[in-house]
Amino acid sequence: MSDIKKNLEVIKEKIDRAAQKSGRKGTDITVIAVTKTIDVARINELISYGIQNIGENKAQELRDKYPQIDPSVNWHFIGHLQSNKIKYIIDKVKLIHSVDSEKLAYNINEAAKKHDKVMDILLQVNVAEDENKFGLSYKEVEPLLYKLKDLKNIRVRGLMTIVPYDEEAENNRLYFRRMKQLAVDIDNQNIDNISMEFLSMGMTNDFEIAIEEGSNMVRIGTGIFGARNYNM
Ligand SMILES: *Cc1c(COP(=O)(O)O)cnc(C)c1O
């Protein structure tokens, strides 16, 4: 069996176990395979094993790979997005996870309007207040939602976070718990056009804990493909 297939089976088992701990099923969790730096042959191999969602963090890389990848797959944009690069991805992606400013949200809305589509987005929250990470502060999220609710060509469908790497993933549990609480609090307000269906959190190092705390979208790269080679 190939390494990718083996890795995927191990991850699926871990997801099943973590989902059960939080009263859910493994199938309630969406696996987004993070394919940055991974060549198209390996991505298409992965898709042949049933993966339906892939994530890229650079707009040009996504644009360049797009025509070479099995068209059945859903693309997710998960990296920091500059407004001048929205045009590379707006007609290709299913969900943008990394909206971290009002300006970016407005610009995505404008680009989506040009393509006559409604773009689903998540707001990225810097829940750990890590200076090295992008994202809204916890307090900025709610006021921003009230500004975005009337835009016709974007729809906020949840929240995303990237927590600091910690060898001891257990140390990040409180951040994941805080994110879930924020999503519940927002949901309780029933804001027009805003839903909290998706909570995108958890990477190779900490996805089990993120799921235990309520994540339903995990973004996994290394755990599926092995260590990335940035010099290709
Ligand atoms: C690279 C990346 C991941 C995946 O990281 P791994 O540790 O390889 O699983 C997840 N989310 C984002 C935003 C990333 O850039």
Image (tube, rainbow, N blue to C red):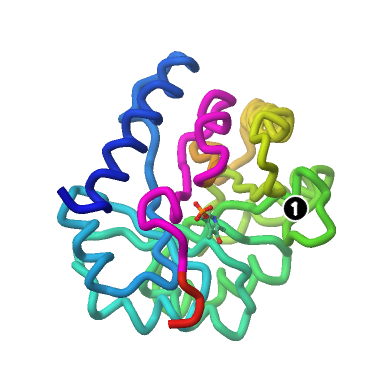
Please count the marks in the image: 1
Q: Mark 1 belongs to which amino acid?
A: Leu
Residue in the image at 72% along x and 71% along y: 103
Q: Which residue is mark 1?
A: 144
Image position of 72 (left or right of 21): left
Q: Nearer the viewer, residue 192 or 77?
A: 77
Residue plotted at (71% across, 49% down): 164
Does the closest atom of ligand 1 sit within 8 Å of the Cβ of label 1?
Answer: no
Q: Position of residue 146 (x, y in %)?
A: 72, 48
Give the magenta range.
204-228
Quarter holding residue 212: top right
* 4 drawn magenta: no
Q: Secondary structure at mark 1?
A: helix
- Image coordinates for residue 8, horizontal then vertical, percent: 29, 44
* Quadrant holding the C terminus: bottom left
Label 1 Cα neighbours within 10 Å, binned few <14 / some 14-19 / many ≥20: some
Residue toward you, 44 or 52: 44
Q: In the picture, residue 48 is in which quadrant?
A: bottom left
Q: Look at 23% across and 72% down and name the residue there.
A: 69
From the top left corner, tell me how far across and down residue 207 is, in percent: 52, 37
Residue at left offset 46%, top offset 60%: 227
Relative to 9, 218 lies left or right: right
Given residues 160 and 16, the one toward you in this image is 16
Image position, residue 180 (x, y; %): 64, 30
